[in-house]
Image (cartoon, helix red, strand yellow):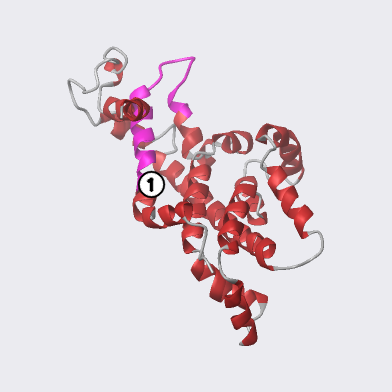
Amino acid sequence: MGIGISMVYPLIWMVFSSFKPTNSIFATATQLFPDQFTLDNYINGWKGIGRTPFSQFFANTFFVCIIATLGTVASCAMVAYSFARLRYRLRGPLFALVLLTMMLPGEILMIPQYLWYNKLSWVNTYLPLTVPLFFATSGFFIYQMKNFIDGIPEALDESARIDGCSFYGIFFRIIIPLIKPSLATVTIFSFLNNWNNYMGALLYLRRTEKYTISLALKLFCDPTSQSDYGAMFAMATLSLIPIFIIFATMQRYLTQGIATSGLKG
């Protein structure tokens, strides 16, 4: 209990600090509740930076997350189905190669990826943050979905094949409806990963009006002048709301996806 509270306390402190006047946040850092509640931080933060309102950063982030999440779920589901059900040469080595990609630190790929995207003129666009995810780049999600599909009795596939279903028909009519908990799990974690993707936005986005929330928050902290920590805490608090909504609405599927591995024959 105490460990859980200590882990959540910084988040709670940030939320309450967002209602404190900016000049008193660190002066009363040891005090959780503000002496004077104010909404000025939310008003000032929502105005954004320069001519770009913070609502624009929210719109940018939602756009990137929705496209990237759809690409991740669709591509990883198809690749996982291929590894779980189809029989072809080099299937084992290819799956092992997918698992090996999980062990590669992201820092190793940053420079070659940046050089590649720069030659494609993708820098300062959302393409590097979305297009690669349509090619099943997450080995963990593929592994998770494959294990779920492995738990579905193959007798269902054979019955559908007898009725004239192709591999695509089996995938869309049999597999997809039965792996909804797994799809929900991948959707939640993929959305969360893209929502918090600071490094990708830092590498590829240069114009302020294209920034995502994770990158825009740092604009409130200026080491060369006065930093508006109150506005930063306020906008960081608002940025948590979509994540809480997603967890609340999809919690049932998330629990099933983690606790089970599919149907047992």
Q: Is residue 188 above or below residue 224?
A: below
- The residue lying at 21 percent from left, 28 percent from top is 38
Percent position of residue 101, x then y: 70, 43
Place of residue 88 in the rendered image (x, y in percent of width and height, measured from the top left): 78, 66
* Residue 54 part of the magenta segment: no
- Seen from this angle, which residue lies furthest bottom? 163
> Picture coordinates of residue 40 (x, y %)?
26, 29
The reply, left or right, for residue 91 in relation to residue 212 is right
Disc 1: CA contacts within 10 A as few (<14), some (14-19) or many (>=20): few
Q: Is residue 249 visible?
A: yes
Image quadrant holding the N terminus, namely top left
Circle 1 sits in a helix, a strand or a loop, which is it? helix
Rendered position, 264 above or below 14: below
Residue indicated by mark 1: 242
Closer to the camera, 257 or 35?
A: 257
Q: Is residue 236 magenta?
A: yes
Magenta-colored segment: predominant secondary structure: helix
- Residue 71 visible somewhere in the drawing: no
Q: Does residue 115 lie above or below 127 as drawn?
A: above
Q: Which residues are magenta?
A: 218-244
Residue sitting at x 50%, y 58%: 182
Amino acid type at circle 1 is Pro
Between 107 and 81, the one nearer to me in the picture: 81
Is 183 left, or right, of 255 in this rendering?
right
Q: Is residue 261 left or right of residue 19?
A: right
- The spot of residue 184 in percent (x, y) is 47, 57
User: How many discs mark residues in the rendered view?
Assistant: 1
Location of the C terminus by quadrant is bottom right
